[in-house]
Amino acid sequence: MIITFFRSSSFGTHTLCPHRFFLEYSLGLKYPSGKKADKGNCCHKVFETLGNIKLCKQKGLRKWNDENLGEFDVLNFSIDDIIRKSFEFYVKITPYHDWEEVDFRDCSKWVYNTLEHSDGLYNPLNRTIVDVERRFDIVIEQPWAKYNYKLETGEVINGYLGLSGTIDLVVDDDNGGIEILDWKTGSRNKFPSSKPKEYIDLIEDPQFLMYTYAARRVYNQPNIMLTVFFCRDGGPYALPFSSDDDEKTEWMLRREFNTIRNTKVPKLCPGWYCKVCPFAQNFTDEGETLCEHYARRVRKDGIDKLFVELGSIKKINNYGDGGGKRTIDKN
């Protein structure tokens, strides 16, 4: 199976179900997000807007113009107005959800749970902002991370494994370093189990290891504090990371990278969560689900043929090309 980069979501998806990983991140099949996720996106949009307002104020600017929500006066704005505009924006772009006023109240409650916690310590307006929604796209230029895939068409994809993602908020830690703030509006459970994540689970979380690994290279900071804030399920957890974690992170990435690229038939991992999987919907008149359809196609045609047929080469080449380290050649 072809893999050229990891995002935290793709890493987690493969851990849960390699077949879903193949459908979503190799074939590039898309599906609408659920309403719970979009309520979370609404809250993230509020925190993002507040971070940008504070950043403008730090720079001495009077206005912040958000491409989705409009213009804000950084000295005269309403948090309630930002929440309402964020909610209305997601209602507009996701008309397939059955939105209700109770959903707005949930978003408002989760936002204020965060902003008011610890006397406003996690309110972006009260912090010195370094970056808002910082996108990173780095490559790991080590021998184990190098790949070279030759397709049936004669095309060759080569380069080094990349890490791509977006960090919610980066702030000054008041000690010459930086702190990452990551907002979570979902539950604190260790999906797919119902057990809550504890500190030991969070400090080993692949997303946080990847984010701090990337941030050390982007900001040239060996020691980084990452605070994950569960807006409706537990509040903040401060997690210290250092360059000592690099070996662990690279071992984790190397193991999963090798597993994925050596896969010929992605494994299906059925469970109760299949009921909420978007690929479990009926796809054919005979009642075959999308998941079952492509599992059959993999067994019949192989993953390489499906990959070429569905045109995912362009997606992999264009998404986060890691400073030009990924190329496609024709023999």
Image (cartoon, grey):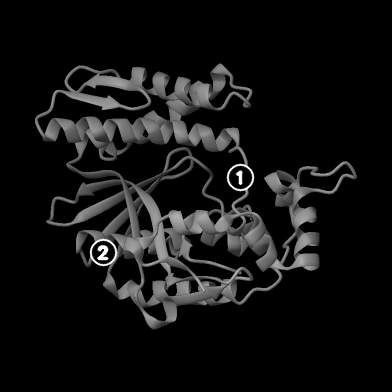
- Asked if the residues shown at circle 1 and circle 2 are in contact, with their CB atoms under 8 angstroms apart, the answer is no
User: Marks 1 and 2, how far apart in space?
Assistant: 32 Å
Q: Quadrant of residue 1?
A: bottom right
Q: In this view, does 282 lie above or below 303?
A: above
As drawn, the residue found furthest toward the front would be 331
15 horizontally vs 236: left or right: right
325 horizontally vs 282: left or right: left
Of tags 1 and 2, the one toward the viewer is 1
Q: Residue at x 71, y 70 (%)?
A: 265
Q: In this view, does 10 lie above or below 265?
A: above
Position of residue 280 measured from the top left corner of the image (x, y, whole percent): 75, 47
**Helix, strand or loop at mark 1:** loop
Position of residue 40 measured from the top left corner of the image (x, y, whole percent): 48, 36
Position of residue 167 measured from the top left corner of the image (x, y, whole percent): 34, 49
Q: In which quarter of the image is residue 121?
A: top left
**Helix, strand or loop at mark 2:** helix
As drawn, the residue found furthest toward the bottom would be 143
Which residue does the numbered mark 1 point to in the structure image?
30
Q: Quadrant of residue 152?
A: bottom right
Frontmost residue, 309 versus 292: 309
Residue 225 in view, yes or no: yes
Q: Which residue is drawn at 74% across and 52% down?
A: 272
Marked residue nearer the N-terminal end (1 or 2): 1
Residue type at the position of mark 1: Lys
Q: Is residue 133 above or below residue 209?
A: above
Q: Residue 8 carries which label?
A: none
Position of residue 291 measured from the top left corner of the image (x, y, whole percent): 75, 53
Q: Residue 216 carries which label?
A: 2
Crowding at dot 1, Cα within 10 Å, few <14 / some 14-19 / many 20+, comes out as: few
Q: In this view, does 151 lie above or below 11?
A: below
Q: Residue at x 43, y 77 (%)?
A: 146
